[in-house]
Amino acid sequence: MSNVNMMEFALVSEIKKYIDYDPTTGQFKRVGREHNTNGKIGTDHNGRNLCICVNKVTYQAARLAWYLTYGDIPKGMLVLRKDKDIYNNKIDNLFLGSFEEAYENKRVHKNNKLKEKNIILVGGKTYRVQIWRNGKFVFLKQVQDLEEAKKLRDDFLAKWRATRRVKVKK
């Protein structure tokens, strides 16, 4: 599956000939085909994305939902889910974000003993706070207390998010 650029997106009117999207339920249905299970469509790709094929072009369901509702997606932006559920494509669950926000929106890895993002236990004594920015980890600070590390991380992310939000016309 290739990642589709906006230039490769068919016109909304062309897609709507084949696909019906309900923004309140987040469900996609094929136009004129109700014989498959509940009329729902989409393929789960390794639990990462729900994908929908239209005219032999595969689209990520969240990107397709955004495109059908709001139009073009700005260059360098991704369509992310607030609840991280690949099957929840309701328009109020989707938002535009950068690659950094996508990294922040990821789940905590199963081998992370602290169960905290962006905080690493160093030598069993101190906690290193590092944030993913511009394609690399940025070291913030190394502290003695886990609660202090959480506060430092959360304060930094709140300030950063406040400067990065994209306004969308609705």
Image: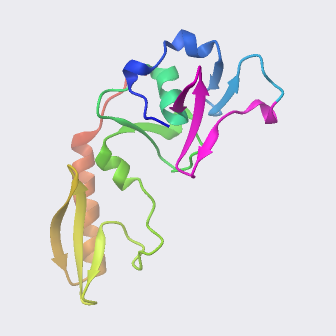
The quadrant of the rendering that contains the C terminus is top left
- Residue 95 relative to residue 83: left or right: left
The answer to whether residue 5 shows anywhere in this view is: yes
Q: Is residue 21 magenta?
A: no
Magenta residues (range): 36-59
Q: Is residue 168 above or below residue 142?
A: above
Q: Quadrant of residue 9?
A: top left
The x and y percentages for residue 136 are: 21, 56
Between 137 and 159, the residue placed more toward the observer is: 137
- Residue 111 relative to residue 38: left or right: left
Q: Quadrant of residue 122?
A: bottom left
Q: Is residue 109 above or below residue 6?
A: below
Q: Quadrant of residue 115?
A: bottom left
The x and y percentages for residue 159 are: 22, 51
Q: Is residue 42 magenta?
A: yes
Residue plotted at (42% across, 20% down)? 8
The answer to whether residue 87 shows anywhere in this view is: no
Q: Is residue 5 above or below residue 2?
A: above
Residue plotted at (29% across, 81% down)? 121
Query: What colour scheme was applied to this rendering of the protein?
Result: rainbow
Between 41 and 156, the residue placed more toward the observer is: 41
- Residue 29 relative to residue 159: left or right: right
Q: Residue furthest bottom?
A: 124
Q: Is residue 136 above or below residue 139?
A: above
- Residue 111 relative to residue 45: left or right: left
The x and y percentages for residue 24 are: 62, 30
Residue plotted at (59% across, 23% down)? 54
The x and y percentages for residue 99 are: 31, 45
Residue plotted at (52% across, 21% down)? 68
